[in-house]
Image: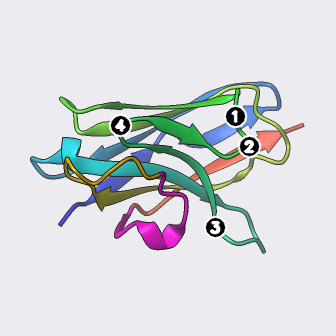
C-alpha cells in the first residue's frame, strides 16, 4: 500500500509559478512510477506529467511544467511555470508499482495507476 499526500496548491496570477509536492509512504518509493493528473470542474481527469526512468508530459504543459522526484525524501514534485487561465484544476498525484524490468512504457491513463492522493486545488487569476 502507498499513501500519497499532495501539497503546494493555491492561488497564483496568470504567468506565475507554483510547485506541487506529493509525499509518499512506504520504503520502496523508487520502484513506483509516479504521475500528476488534473481535473477541472465538468471535465474528465487528464494526464499532466509522469516519471519512471524518464519523464513525459501532456502537450498542453510541455515546456512549462517539470516533474521530478527525490527518492530519498519519497517525494515527487510538479514545478508549474507560466501558468495559464486553462490550468486551474484539482491536481492529483498517482502511483503504480513499476519494478525494474517493467520496460519503458509511458503511463498516461488514470487506469494505469493504483494509488491516488486527495488532490490539491490550483487557481489561476487573470
Q: Residue at x 83, y 48 (%)?
A: 86
Q: Which residue is situated farthest in the right direction here?
A: 126
Residue 59 is marked as: 2
Q: CA distance from mark 3 to mark 1?
A: 18 Å
Please state which of the two labelled residues, at mark 4 or mark 1, is closer to the viewer. 4
User: On the rendered structure, is 31 left or right of 93?
Assistant: left
* Element at label 4: loop
| Residue labelled with disc 1 | 62
The picture places residue 17, in percent across and down from the top left corner, at 66, 26
Q: Give the magenta part as a residue range.
A: 106-116
Q: CA distance from mark 4 to mark 2?
A: 19 Å
Q: CA distance from mark 1 to mark 2?
A: 5 Å
User: On the rendered structure, is 4 left or right of 65?
Assistant: left
The picture places residue 72, in percent across and down from the top left corner, at 18, 29
The picture places residue 77, in percent across and down from the top left corner, at 44, 35
User: Which of the marked residues, 4 or 2, is nearer the chain's N terminus?
Assistant: 4
The picture places residue 88, in percent across and down from the top left corner, at 74, 50
User: Which of the marked residues, 3 or 1, is nearer the chain's N terminus?
Assistant: 3
| Residue labelled with disc 3 | 45
Q: Reply above or below: 76 against 104.
A: above
Q: CA distance from mark 4 to mark 1?
A: 18 Å
* Element at label 1: loop
User: Which of the marked residues, 3 or 4, is nearer the chain's N terminus?
Assistant: 3
Q: Is residue 71 magenta?
A: no
User: On the rendered structure, is 77 left or right of 43?
Assistant: left
Q: Quadrant of the C terminus?
A: top right
Residue 53 is marked as: 4
Please state which of the two labelled residues, at mark 4 or mark 2, is closer to the viewer. 4
* Element at label 2: loop
Amino acid at each position: 500500500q502507498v499513501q500519497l499526500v499532495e501539497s503546494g496548491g493555491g492561488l497564483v496570477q496568470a504567468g506565475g509559478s507554483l510547485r506541487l509536492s506529493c509525499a509518499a509512504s512506504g520504503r520502496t518509493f523508487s520502484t513506483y512510477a509516479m504521475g500528476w493528473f488534473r481535473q477541472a470542474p465538468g471535465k474528465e481527469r487528464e494526464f499532466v506529467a509522469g516519471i519512471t526512468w524518464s519523464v513525459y508530459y501532456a502537450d498542453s504543459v510541455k515546456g512549462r511544467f517539470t516533474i521530478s522526484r527525490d527518492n530519498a525524501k519519497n517525494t515527487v514534485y510538479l514545478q508549474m511555470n507560466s501558468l495559464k487561465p486553462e490550468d486551474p484544476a484539482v491536481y492529483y498525484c498517482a502511483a503504480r508499482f513499476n519494478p525494474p524490468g517493467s520496460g519503458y512504457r509511458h503511463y498516461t491513463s488514470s487506469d494505469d495507476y493504483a494509488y491516488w492522493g486527495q488532490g490539491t486545488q490550483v487557481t489561476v487569476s487573470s
